[in-house]
Amino acid sequence: MNPASYCYNTNSKFRTDHFIIGSKGSVSDAKMQEIARVAQNTFENDLAKFSWDAWSDLGVSYSKPLEVCVIASEGANGAGNELGFVIGPDRSGSNLDKLVQHELKHTYQARFIGPTGLNDAHVWFAEAVATFLSTNETVNAASLNAFISQTGMTPTQVTHDGLQEGVMMRLSDKSTEYGAYNMALRYLQTQGASVQDFWEVFKTMKLIEKSCKTDHQKAIDNHEMVNPIDEKSTSCTGNANVYSTGATQWNGVIISGSIEDHIVGKSEPGKSKFHAAFDYVMNAHSVTYDGIDDVAAFRSTVMNGM
C-alpha cells in the first residue's frame, strides 16, 4: 500500500479493476471482498453517470489503482482522500453502499484539486457535494435556524476542519449537519447550477494553483529569495512582497494562500482558491460566495428559496 496510506506496511489482499484492498486490525476476508465489490460497482457507475474516463479524468487505472484501507477501529465510519478511502467494517447492505458512494466523492474532489489536497476546498461545499450525490439528506427551516443559533455560523461559513469540529461540539442534533450543507447546494440548483458545475469548482481550483505555481517558478528563475516549490503546498499568496511580480492573481482576482474564516478573519488579502473558483463557476448563475455566506445572506437566499 502507498506510504501515505493508513494501511502502509500492510499488503493489499484483494483487488478489482480499479482498487486494491488492505486492512488493519481484525477484518474478515468476506468483509473486504464485500467492500471491494461495492467500491468497484460505485466507481463504474460514477464513470458512466458523469461521463468520465478513469485514467484521463481521475488518473486511475489497473496499474495505478485507488486504495481501500479497512480499519477495524473505524467501526461504521469512513473518510475519502486522494489515495482512495478509509472505512470501518461495521456497515453492510445499503448503509455500506451509501458510505462508499459518499467517500468516493471526496476522492474525486481531491483528485480534481490536485496535490495541495482537499483541505483547500470549503468543508461545507465538499460535504454538500458528497451528500447530494449519495444520501441526498435535507433539513427543514427549523433545523437550519437551530444550526445557526447553536453554532454561531451558517452552514456556508463552515470553511475548514476546525470550524466543523466546532459545529459537532455545539449542534444538538448532529444528524442534521450534512443535510444543512446540502440545502445550500440545492439552492444553487434552483439558480441553474448543475452537477457538472459543482465538479468544475474543484477542477478550477487546480487551474488556479497552476497559475500560482507559474508565478512561483518565475520568481525562482529570477533568483528571488523564495522557498522551493512544494507540490503539496500552495504557491498562492495575497501578500505583494513575496514575489517581485506582486500578489498572485487569476482571472483578475488576487488569490490568497489562506482560507476564509469568519471568526478569526484571513491572514492575507485576496480570495482563497475555493472562493475564486466558486465565484468563477457560479457567475453564470448570478451567484457569489459572499452572497450566501453570512446570516443575512444565507437567510435571504438559501432559506428564502426553500
Image: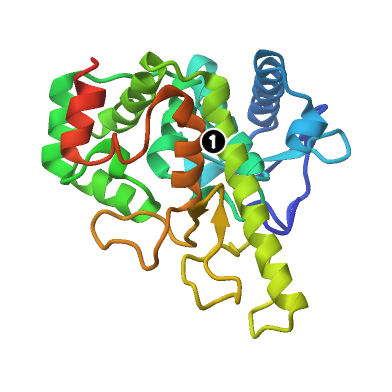
Residue 114, above or below 221:
above
Which of these two is toward me, 107 or 53? 53
Q: Residue at x 57, y 45 (%)?
A: 205
**Image spot of residue 39 (x, y percent):** 66, 26
**Image spot of residue 121 (x, y percent):** 48, 46
Which amino acid, by three-letter code, is at mark 1? Val
Left of 94 or right of it: where is 25?
right
Q: What residue is shown with label 1? A: 201
Left of 43 or right of it: where is 25?
left
Q: Residue at x 66, y 48 (%)?
A: 114
Left of 181 or right of it: where is 8?
right
Q: Residue at x 26, y 63 (%)?
A: 264
Asked if residue 172 can be seen in this view, the reply is no
**Image spot of residue 18 (x, y percent):** 79, 30
- Give the class, few, some or many, for how many residues have Cα within 10 Å of label 1's Cα (few <14, many ≥20): many
Asked if residue 42 can be seen in this view, the reply is yes
- Classify residue 186 by image quadrant: top left
- Quarter holding the C terminus is top left
**Image spot of residue 257 (x, y percent):** 49, 62
The color scheme shown is rainbow
Which of these two is toward me, 99 or 123? 123
Q: Secondary structure at mark 1?
A: helix
Which of these two is toward me, 75 or 144? 144
